[in-house]
Image: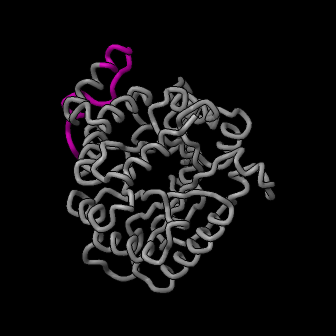
Amino acid sequence: MEKSLDIKIRNILADPSSNDFIIADAKDGDMGFGVAAPGLNKEPSHLEYGSVKDHRDNMRAIVEQGLVDIMLMSVSASEQLTLEERIFDGSTVTPAIRANDTSDIWCGLSANYGDQPSLPFRSTTIEHAQCGKAICSDEERSLGANLGLYSMTFNNDAQLDREALQAYKEFRIEAELKGFRHFLEVFAPNSPVQPIADIPRYVNDCITRTLGGVPKAGRPVFLKIPYFGPEAMEQLAHYDSSIIVGILGGSSGTTHDAFRMLWESKKYGGHAALFGRKINNSEHPLTFVKFLRHLADGDLEPEQAVRDYHGELSNLGVEPYRSLEDDLQVTQF
């Protein structure tokens, strides 16, 4: 079965004005947020957060629904779901893994690594993603995930940024040799060593400089960046139409925050959205994803989508976290 991701990438590259839009559920939070990764425990308990089992049950349900194009996981989750359970074999959803975990994604309540300049690091290996062990035969490489998220954070420091670029170069070459595709996440500076006057322009410049020296064989299939607004999105999408630009979701916010972010980024040239906490912390993730797909396909506009989402929550007997009036507020723009 051909994956929806491959169809959409082909369509977007052939026609940058294409209506195709990629949605990923970013369920790789166990590599960043620790025990908080599954989200709040929805079962009566003195324990605040869910379990790994809950987290993977949510992944199974989203994949079975079939409305996202990518399920992003840690390698340990992918080993269970991709290699052992084979849940992606008859699905249009593409399995993907977090290929590196720079120090600034080590978040959660127990540490403050995110306040320190990012340092490159990789817990996993390409082989572990592809076949679950340190050495794969050529035949085994197609058994697991063959798509990974690689993340970088530039902090306006020549030594630190050079180290990040060198680590990415080594990863790209290794991935090319092993037939492993990747998409590139570039965060906003998390602890700039020197002041940055225009952060959106700085991030765009870092991306274009980074990819300027990379041939097609080593390029990411698309980007995942913060949504800085219409001007920055248009600037990057216009610069090179062979670079598919996608956005990351960030913190949860209101339902209108999530819906408008996806809708607006598409309006100004974006073709992908990778939402983690926005999906995971919603009242009913399957219904939330359904409305993300409606927005991505151009079937609804954000405000009406929020109203319809609340209507479906009511039909399901699910109590919303906020009143409709509060959930219609836009707080993250």
Report x, y in % for residue 272: 38, 48
User: In which quadrant of the rendered view does residue 230 lie?
Assistant: bottom left
Q: Tell me: 329 left or right of 87.
A: left
In the rendered image, the residue lying farthest to the front is: 14
Name the residue at the bottom extreme.
158
How far across and how far down the image is residue 57, in percent?
59, 30
Residue 86 placed where, x, y %? 68, 34
**Residue bounds of the magenta highlight:** 312-331
Asked if residue 277 can be seen in this view, the reply is: no
Does the segment drawn in magenta span residue 322?
yes
Pinpoint residue 138: horizontal percent, then vertical percent: 77, 54
Residue 307 appearing in the image: yes
Image: 137 above or below 43: below
The image's colour scheme reads one colour
Task: Look at the picture and state if 101 lies above or below 34.
Answer: below
For the point 27% across and 54% down, the residue is: 269
The answer to which quarter of the image holds residue 308 is top left
